[in-house]
Image (tube, rainbow, N blue to C red):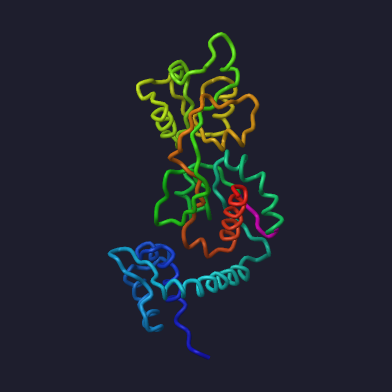
Amino acid sequence: MRRLPPLGAIEAFVQVARLGSIKAAAQELALSAPALSRRVQSLERFIGKPLFDRRHQAMSPNADGERLLGQIAPVLDQLSDAVEAMTSGGDVLRLRLGVLPLFASQRLFPRLGSLRLAHPELHLDIDTAAHGIARLGEGLDAVIALAREIDPALYAKRLDRNSVYLIGAKTLLDGPDPITRPEQISGLTALVHREMSENFTAWRTQAGLEGIEPLAIDLFDSGPLMLEAAAQGLGVAFMHQSHFADAADPRLVQLFDISVESPYSYWFVCRPRALLQKPVRLFRDWLIETLADEKA
């Protein structure tokens, strides 16, 4: 039987190939950058050819590296799964998932039945507290986050692109002074999510209303409460088209025919090393496939 390279060298190669840098991979594997570089170089010497194109701090697999990654990464994942199964103490797989309440109620929970059918062994611990990305690896395995961009040291998969709608109570269209012109926001309270403040700026700019200020800006940290406040006539909410559509609330309407691309997207985020965990991979693959099928 042919001698195999050290497992540490294989793991180092896979992490560098996935992350694109020695520094990021070293952080994930709790090694120094020189130590990780030596492991990668030892694998290249074992194989007898370079596996990366090296450009300053970045490293990307060359053709040989891509071919090896495609063959060896799934085997490494299977090995990790086997060890996890032997040490987990049971057949239940558990994922600690951070998710925003509105995404959970509108887009995740209505679809979890299909996840249970596909993977009955997978169970979710749901965490809706703030700052999920900062808690990855320390209480959370993965996060569904709403953000403009994600730290490149993390694994991230964009789940959508969305438009900003101005959402208000249907009653605003009735009465002696109905809201029919964008300029009328000067007499309304704007409801804005604390973590999506640029939605208001983007919408106002597109509408050509930079010089017009709303009566007040009320900040929220809860999407469901923003929708309820809008429905109760307490203000108009600058939110995503998907939030409006999924709410399907007959009390709400989109005000004006103005729709602009949102600076924010939902992302699936985890630490790259977490992709070695079977629960993380199962959930990620199911989530991406489910959302893709809905767009098709």
Whole-percent x, y for residue 189 in the image: 47, 20
Q: Which residue occupies 47% across, 77% down?
A: 7
Left or right, residue 177 beside residue 294: left
Whole-percent x, y for residue 42 in the image: 37, 80
Q: Which residue occupies 53% across, 34% down?
A: 222
Which residue ends up furthest to the left in the rendered image?
Answer: 56
Which residue ends up furthest to the bottom in the rendered image?
Answer: 1
Q: Which residue occupies 50% across, 40% down?
A: 162
Left or right, residue 220 beside residue 120: left
- Residue 263 lies, with reference to residue 94, above or below; the image says above
Left or right, residue 29 beside residue 295: left
* Foreground of the two, 254 or 95: 254
Q: Which quadrant holds residue 205?
A: top left
* Foreground of the two, 145 or 185: 185
Whole-percent x, y for residue 257 in the image: 51, 27
The count of marks equals 0
Q: Main secondary structure of the magenta part?
A: strand
- Residue 257 lies, with reference to residue 89, above or below; the image says above
For residue 130: magenta? no
- Residue 105 lies, with reference to residue 94, above or below; the image says above
**What are the residue bounds of the magenta stretch?**
120-125
* Foreground of the two, 11 or 106: 106
Q: Which residue occupies 41% across, 83% down?
A: 47
Whole-percent x, y for residue 116 in the image: 69, 54
